[in-house]
Amino acid sequence: MEVLVSAAIMMTLAAGLMAMAGVALTQSENQGHLAARTAEYAQDKMEQLLVLAYGDSTSDTRVFPATTSGGTGLAIGGSANAAAPVNGYVDYLDPRGNLLAAGVAGAPAGWFYKRVWQVTSLSATLKEVRVTATVARGIGRQATPTATLVTLKTFPF
């Protein structure tokens, strides 16, 4: 009888620990791994945009390395809302971070990370560049990890 009571107590404790382990796993994956990747990929896109000349409005940064035509460069436009991407201001990555070609109807199959960017004019010589990266899905019922970076680009640089 004593063994059954102690086994019941141990199973109750183990069940409580397993629930905590599930929460820890979810938090570690979402806020550790996925959030770190979204920040890294947002920074990669920001660096790609910042090397463009202030007046560049034709470079295609949806490919890497950027081509000199076919894109939006640092033209005013885009959206910082990942749920409402603007054509020319969005690209997609696979789960390993490799750039995917855009699909005919928008997002390509198999995308896992989405990056959107917005360029706004603050004055005649100052632009704000905002990049938001997010994931297609996280673990559990939590909001998907998202990272947003903002910087300024000045003329003549």
Image (cartoon, grey):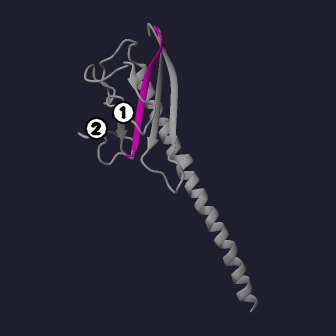
Mark 1–mark 2 Cα distance, whole angstroms, equals 9 Å
Q: Residue furthest bottom?
A: 1
Tag 2: amino acid: Ala
Q: Secondary structure at mark 2?
A: loop
Is residue 137 positioned above or below 72 on the image? below
Q: Is residue 81 left or right of residue 30?
A: left
Q: What residue is rendered at 52% in x and 47% in y? A: 33
Q: Residue at x 64, y 72 (%)?
A: 15
What's the magenta region? Answer: 112-124
- Amino acid under disc 1: Val
Q: Is residue 53 above or below residue 22?
A: above
Whole-percent x and y of residue 28?
57, 52
| Residue linked to disc 2 | 102
* Mark 1 and mark 2 residues within 8 Å of each other at the beta carbon: yes
What x and y, as percent, mark residue 60? 30, 24
Residue highlighted by disc 1 = 90
Residue closest to the eye, 75 or 41: 75
Q: Residue furthest right?
A: 2
Left or right, 31 with respect to 48, comes to right
Q: Secondary structure at mark 1?
A: strand
